[in-house]
Image (tube, rainbow, N blue to C red):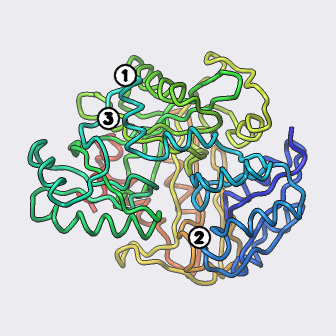
Amino acid sequence: MFSRILIANRGEIALRIIRACHELNIEAVVVYSEADRDASYLQLADEAICIGPADCAKSYLNIPRIISAAEISDVEAIHPGYGFLAENINFAQICRDCGITFIGPPVEAMQLLGDKIQARKLASKAGVPIVPGSDGALDTESMALELANKMGYPVILKATSGGGGRGMRVVHNDITLRSAFNSARAEAEAAFGDGSIYLEKFIVEPRHVEVQVMADAHGNALHFYERDCSIQRRHQKMIEESPCPVLDKQTRGQLAEAALKIIKKAKYVNAATVEFLLDNDKNFYFIEVNTRIQVEHPVTEMVTGHDLIKWQLKIAAGLPMKLNQKNIKHTGVAIECRINAEDPENNFAPSPGKITRLILPGGPGVRVDTHVHQGWTVSPTYDSMIAKLIVHQRTRTEAIATMKRALREFIIEPIKTTIPACLDILSHNLFVKNKIDTGFVERNF
């Protein structure tokens, strides 16, 4: 096992990794920007190193500074968390070249799966159904128009790199496709440094279902069941739950088997999330693999009892998973709400500022993952997510009730947050009846 690692991230995921490290007797070194100088989790780390100003390009995305911090702090490995450099192939390769273990998949697997077009091809070779679409990146608007008319509208444009809904556009006719093509490319270029996009048939009213997978370097690949991430706004997840409430035992097994086929085909090691769309007839289609730990990983931890960050650390250290699939049980229902510093009444505009009053919820079955504290100033520079509220109960009905109670207890002032929006969604008749899909928020709110 490692004795000392560096965490190349910030906020709640940095704190989450620090805690996992300390429970495994690993020293945790954390980097921070000048904007995060007063973050309370820095005091919990064994060492904290400033790597630059608030600007991400000069700090959390600055590979030379992060590698320098790793070298001067004498760590054996780097955990990238999620976002920032977590899926950056160049960063993973530099870690390898410097003799530092990258706590994530091998570079070769990232190259195969990080590019969505290559991932689609690999899934197809593995016998996993994929959404019909282009065989590669679309170089011109005319290529996109020709394929869209051949397949039939609606279609969706997607960035070949990155995720989080950036570079993604749903289009319903030639006119909107023409404008969406260039705007999607520009957004993808700005977000990921890669403006290439591809096109898929848009599945109407699908559910977004993802399978959590772990694989070690000893040939073991296991799934930790699925999460339903259908509650989204502009392709950004808001609420996640496990299990997916519409899956029967047979479809759940087929979905997990499909995810493992892809992971094994890619010779993948460490944590991955294999994402699918599920239509109304319970047909599923592969869409992408996230080659990192996910924001919503606590949902899986609550229903399986497995600490996924600890598994990441153990696997990266070369240890085998002393588990078989039968050891991984799924108990009860877990729901997660992402709490963002945004104003739902003002088109979810960012709401940065100083938190002068903070009361965290608690009670049976309630977990809060957050790095913020009373007196903390939410920066406009970084992602707006400031907390994750997770509940675990025996049934979905009980989990919804506990989540609503916990959200009402959760007080963050004076900034605006998405707590009211989450309460509205959880209280909606169709959510309670489990009649949801990825367009639920846009249609009903």
Q: Position of residue 310 (x, y in %)?
A: 75, 40
Q: Secondary structure at mark 1?
A: loop
The residue carrying mark 3 is: 278
Q: Nearer the viewer, residue 240 or 287?
A: 287
Q: Position of residue 4 (x, y in %)?
A: 88, 51
The residue carrying mark 1 is: 127
Q: Is residue 257 left or right of residue 34?
A: left
Q: Is residue 401 left or right of residue 434?
A: right
| Disc number lying in front (3 or 2) | 3
Q: Nearer the viewer, residue 234 or 84?
A: 84
**In the image, which disc is placed on residue 407?**
none
| Residue density around tag 3, few if under 14, some if 14–19, many if 20 or more, within 10 Å | many
The residue carrying mark 2 is: 411
**In what quadrant of the picture does the C terminus appear?**
bottom left
| Disc number lying in front (2 or 1) | 1
Q: Tell me the residue at 28%/37% (across/down).
A: 131
Q: CA distance from mark 2 to mark 1?
A: 48 Å
